[in-house]
Image (spheres, rainbow, N blue to C red):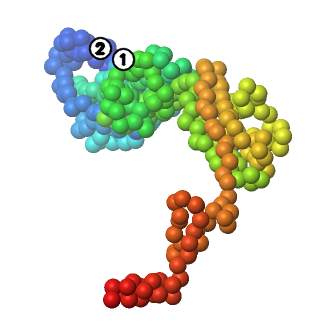
Amino acid sequence: MKNPVCWVVLTGISIAFIQQGLPVRSQGESQSDNKQMDNITIRQGETLFLSCSQGDFVTHTAWLNRSSILYAGEDKWSVDPRVSLVTLNQDEFTIKIEDVDLTDEGQYICAVQTSSRPRTTSVHIIVQVPPKIVNLSKDLVVNEGSNVTLMCLANGKPEPAIVWRMISASDDSLSSDNEVLEIPFISRYRAGVYECTAANDIAVDTQTVELTVNFPPSVSDGRDVGVTLGQRGVLLCEADAVPEADFEWYRDDRRIFNGFDGIEIEDDGGLSKLTFFNVSEADYGNYSCVAINKLGSANTSIVLYEIIEPTSSTLLQGPGAVQDGNSGTSTVFTPTCLLLIVLLHLLLKF
């Protein structure tokens, strides 16, 4: 009986010649039977089963990966713990490779030695790899008007397609079917979250970048406020800015501070409130609100004016009152008086 080790070595040499397209013959000078199986496509991380038929009169058998011997009969030659023997009998010879990786891709050969001649069965393994984004732009803070470039690189097999889009926008110009998304002269309205998607036939990988756009304050037009003497009055100032604006209040050219003359100033994000708890005559007048950040400032004016409550002398005397255009006094005609006037008018006709 032949030495198994010598047979395996000779098998490896024979397969090398087969792969190079050179003829290989057995000791009996009969050409070996070579069979090519269909390619096997498997996803990274799955388990691969490799099987070939044995048949009668098999003396030796082996599974090889390129030039490396994985199994020779029941003897494991591979040092890879993921490789193991599943079945070895007269009908089949099956091994498995767990947690398949891209490095496992390539040609595998089952070599069988019968009493008459050798036989090989080869199969090519294709490993598919889900996409993985490996290089993505970091979150960015830029000033309005800047040119922005976002980058997204991904690995995978088949090669993944890259798509950029702004999550909260309906504008198609904010999307790109490319690794690079260019945004020239960026405006405040294009600040937000941008999503990069890498996809192939296996899976999808998605990651996001947050883009912050700094811009100077813009202040809403101030609304004048009328307040009755002695009542509470509130002036409002609203500003849109990134970073958030700081507010300053002025009466003419004099700055007003919180707590000054019983006045309270309260800022909450983009809104500032100037509150008078007890409006006096001296409080009426023109006020200015200034919103400031590191990129600039904006202001608006608000007038606090007096509302005079109506008195009894300014009210009408009722539905029967007639205003005298000359004297400014009112003459009241009662129903009885009106009836006497009508009767007198009728009598005068006779």
The one nearer the camera, 170 or 151, is 170
Inspect this view and state whether residue 90 appears.
yes
Is 257 left, or right, of 109 in this rendering? right
Residue at 47 percent of width and 87 percent of height = 340
What label does residue 16 carry, if any? 2
Please state which amino acid type lies under the numbered disc 2: Ala
Q: What element carries label 1?
A: loop
What label does residue 67 carry, if any? 1
Quadrant in the picture for the N terminus: top left
Residue at 28 percent of width and 33 percent of height = 40
Above or below, comparing residue 329 to residue 39 in the picture: below
Measured as percent of width and height from the top left, residue 306 is found at: 68, 48
Query: Quick one: which residue is furthest to the left in this view?
Result: 30
Residue at 52 percent of width and 76 percent of height = 320
Above or below, comparing residue 222 to residue 26 in the picture: below
Quadrant in the picture for the C terminus: bottom left
Inspect this view and state whether residue 114 appears.
no
Q: How far apart are marks 2 and 1 (CA)?
A: 7 Å
Give yes or no for contact between labels 2 and 1 (Cβ–Cβ under 8 Å). yes
Please state which amino acid type lies under the numbered disc 1: Ser
Measured as percent of width and height from the top left, residue 222 is found at: 58, 38
The mark that comes first in sequence, 2 or 1, is 2
